[in-house]
Image: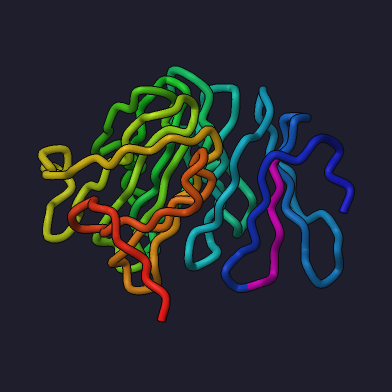
């Protein structure tokens, strides 16, 4: 693939047909996996830092240093929505059911966007850039945090049975993280979170409901 610049992010569509890339030349490109040819190009004004496909493969989300997150329709590769932020958008992630888009920005906010209405329904503030996001497999939790500075918190927001209008009135908890390249991964059943890249601490396991560390035992 010829992406034309330093690649910041890649994503494969859930149907396996497409590969999206985001690069420093301000383009998000979409390649056909079978033919290896470029199908589409979406131009930003700054480097494209993150790309993600919706679960049904019909939407592509992009985040850029130009302070915009974009939703792009696969049918015609047209921009369906520009979602403004006050700083760069370093990460975009769809929820497993495709109803929500979460974004993380250099302004310290992690935002939750209703994909249907294209409206922001909630946000939470981090101590550093909001650049860590993970939805649980069953959509019960959105985990947000920051890897920009050490010793920040990961926020667990319970989304179960909460209407979008009151999502911001969540009850959650924080767990301390200490790493500059932290990645958070839910277990298949959504009950635990693995933190990768924590400085000097290996890969600790957290309970998704309580935020407490789980002891990992070996038989």
User: Which residue is painted at 23% across and 51% down in the image?
Assistant: 211
What colour-coding does the image apply?
A: rainbow
Provide residue 185's location: percent of width, then percent of height: 44, 57
Is residue 84 at least partly visible in the picture? no
Is residue 88 at least partly visible in the picture? yes
* Towards the viewer: 38 or 8: 8
Provide residue 189's location: percent of width, then percent of height: 33, 73
Provide residue 192's location: percent of width, then percent of height: 32, 63
Q: Is residue 178 above or below residue 187?
A: above
**For the magenta stretch, what is the residue range?**
16-22
Residue 145 placement: quadrant: top left
- How many tags in the picture? 0
Residue extending furthest bottom?
219
Secondary structure mostly seen in magenta is: strand
Provide residue 74's location: percent of width, then percent of height: 60, 57
Q: Is residue 112 above or below residue 10?
A: above
Relative to 172, 206 lies left or right: right
User: Which residue is painted at 66% across and 72% down in the image?
Assistant: 16
Q: Is residue 166 magenta?
A: no
Residue extending furthest front?
219
Q: Quadrant of the C terminus?
A: bottom left
Relative to 155, 31 lies left or right: right
Q: Is residue 55 above or below residue 204?
A: below
Q: Quadrant of the N terminus?
A: bottom right
User: Which residue is painted at 23% across and 52% down in the image?
Assistant: 212
User: Which residue is painted at 66% across and 45% down in the image?
Assistant: 9
């Amino acid at each position: 693939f010829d992406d034309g610049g330093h690649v910041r992010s890649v994503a494969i569509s859930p149907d396996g047909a497409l590969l999206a890339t985001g690069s420093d030349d301000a383009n998000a490109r979409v390649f056909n996996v079978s033919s290896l040819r470029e199908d589409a190009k979406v131009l930003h004004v700054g480097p494209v830092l993150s790309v993600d496909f919706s679960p049904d493969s019909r939407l592509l989300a992009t985040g850029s240093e130009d302070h915009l997150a974009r939703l792009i329709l696969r049918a015609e590769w047209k921009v369906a929505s520009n979602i403004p932020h006050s700083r760069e958008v370093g990460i975009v992630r769809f929820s497993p059911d495709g109803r929500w888009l979460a974004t993380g920005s250099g302004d310290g906010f992690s935002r939750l966007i209703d994909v249907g209405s294209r409206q922001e329904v909630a946000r939470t503030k981090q101590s550093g850039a909001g650049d860590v996001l993970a939805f649980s497999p069953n959509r019960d939790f959105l985990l947000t945090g920051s890897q920009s500075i050490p010793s920040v918190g990961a926020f667990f927001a319970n989304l179960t049975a909460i209407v979008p209008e009151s999502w911001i009135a969540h009850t959650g908890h924080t767990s301390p993280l200490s790493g500059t390249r932290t990645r958070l991964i839910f277990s298949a059943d959504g009950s635990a979170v693995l933190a990768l890249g924590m400085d000097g601490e290996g890969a600790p396991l957290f309970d998704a409901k309580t935020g407490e560390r789980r002891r990992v035992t070996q038989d």
